[in-house]
Image (cartoon, rainbow, N blue to C red):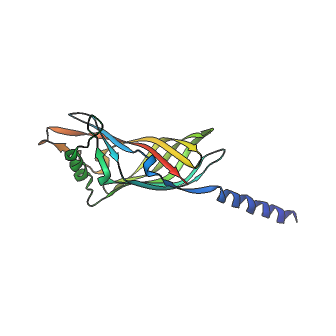
Amino acid sequence: MKKIKLVALFIFGLSMNIFAQDSYKLVENKTKNMVTGTSTLHDWRCVAEKQSGTAVIKTGDMLEVKSLTARIAAKSLKSIKENGKYYDDAMDKNAYKALDADKHPEIAYTLTGVSNMKTTGTASTFSATGTLTIAGKTNKVTFPVKAVVNGNTVTFTATVKFKLTAFGITPPKALMGTIKTGDDVAVVLNSTFAK
């Protein structure tokens, strides 16, 4: 009889664990992801206007991110001019060419592991490891993340630094090579997922 009770308790506990996990989707109008970098003329930034993502997350005393994928449409990256209001079409065209956006229309990230999770109240920090695919080339990346739970939403903030050449991308040039983009870039994430 004790064995039956133990088995029943185990199954109940397992089912509670499964049901405590929820599916989340990226909320586009609450998400602001950017790519930033430098050039011989000035620093630059591009805002992603079209993105999507899904995640399986367990909230509670300790946050658990079971899975997460995110995608940015390469041609939705729009460069912001210095006044922060207008786009620079010439720079965008150079960026799309460098990303080979016609052949590789998406920048994609897939989480493969989480470590060093620390949760205090509604905020958690952890190290995320995953695969990042840009211009058809996939590399493993690891970076620190902060996550904040607010009701039915979880917002992730992080900065992912890498070199364009690590993804086989030649840093774009303009005006017959007089303006050169730096090799070091960063993806600055502020992504909100909701269930």
Please name the residue shown 79% across and 64% down the image: 8
Residue 73, how many percent across, how many down? 34, 55
Q: Residue at x 18, y 43 (%)?
A: 173
Q: Is residue 191 visible to us here?
A: yes
| Residue occupying the point 25% across, 52% down | 96
Residue at 34% x, 57% y is 106
Left or right for 24, reference 141: right
Q: Nearer the viewer, residue 37 or 30?
A: 30
Picture coordinates of residue 78, whole percent (x, y): 29, 47
- Indicate left or right for 14 with 118 as reference: right
User: Which image quarter is the N terminus in?
Assistant: bottom right
Q: Residue furthest left?
A: 176
* Residue lying farthest to the right in this orientation: 1
Q: Looking at the rendering, which quadrant does residue 7 occupy?
A: bottom right
Residue 71 visible in image = no
The C terminus: image quadrant: bottom right
Using the image, determine if residue 56 lies above or below residue 30: below
x, y percentage for residue 101?
Answer: 27, 56
Label count reads 0
